[in-house]
Image (cartoon, rainbow, N blue to C red):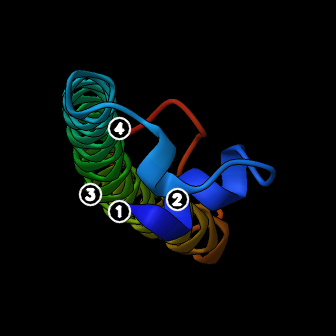
Amino acid sequence: VCNFLRSWFPNQSCFSFSPPQLEALVAKHRETYRRMLEQLLLAEKCHRRTVYELENEKHKHTDYMNKSDDFTNLLEQDRERQHRRGQHLDLHPLASPCQKV
């Protein structure tokens, strides 16, 4: 307590304060400390929520990319199938483009 008092009141001895003044200072310190811890807990809670939301968005993005890749693969397979079908029709000169082979 004396070091704390010297930092705030460098020209006074810690023994120059009355016991009620010291008790009021200690009570004020405890209240300030409690409020500081409360703010720290609130910040930690917000941080945890933000990390959770970021992880959730990361999983959503991964799922979206996987689905997008699957869809792209299906489109490529369909394009290849259409291409092979077109080549198959080219091999049959009597087949018309509207006629099923």
Assess disc 3: are there few (<14), some (14-19) or many (≥20) residues with their C-alpha within 10 Å of its C-alpha: few
Dot 1: element: helix
The mark lying in front, picked from 4 and 1, is 4
What residue did someone put label 1 on? 62
Residue 10 at x, y = what percent? Answer: 78, 54
Q: Residue at x 27, y 47 (%)?
A: 44
> Which amino acid type is shown beneath numbered disc 1?
Thr
Residue 59 circle label: 3
Among numbered discs 2 and 4, the one appearing first in the sequence: 2
**Mark 2 to mark 4 CA distance (whole Å):** 27 Å
The answer to whether mark 2 and mark 4 are in CB contact below 8 A is: no
Q: Residue at x 24, y 41 (%)?
A: 37
Residue 96 in which image quadrant: top right
> Which amino acid type is shown beneath numbered disc 4?
Ala
Residue 40 in which image quadrant: top left
What residue did someone put label 2 on? 4
Residue 6 in which image quadrant: bottom right
From the viewer's perspective, is 90 left or right of 50?
A: right
The answer to whether mark 3 and mark 1 are in CB contact below 8 A is: yes
Q: Residue at x 32, y 31 (%)?
A: 18
Dot 2: element: helix
Q: Residue at x 53, y 51 (%)?
A: 95
- The quadrant the C terminus occupies is bottom left
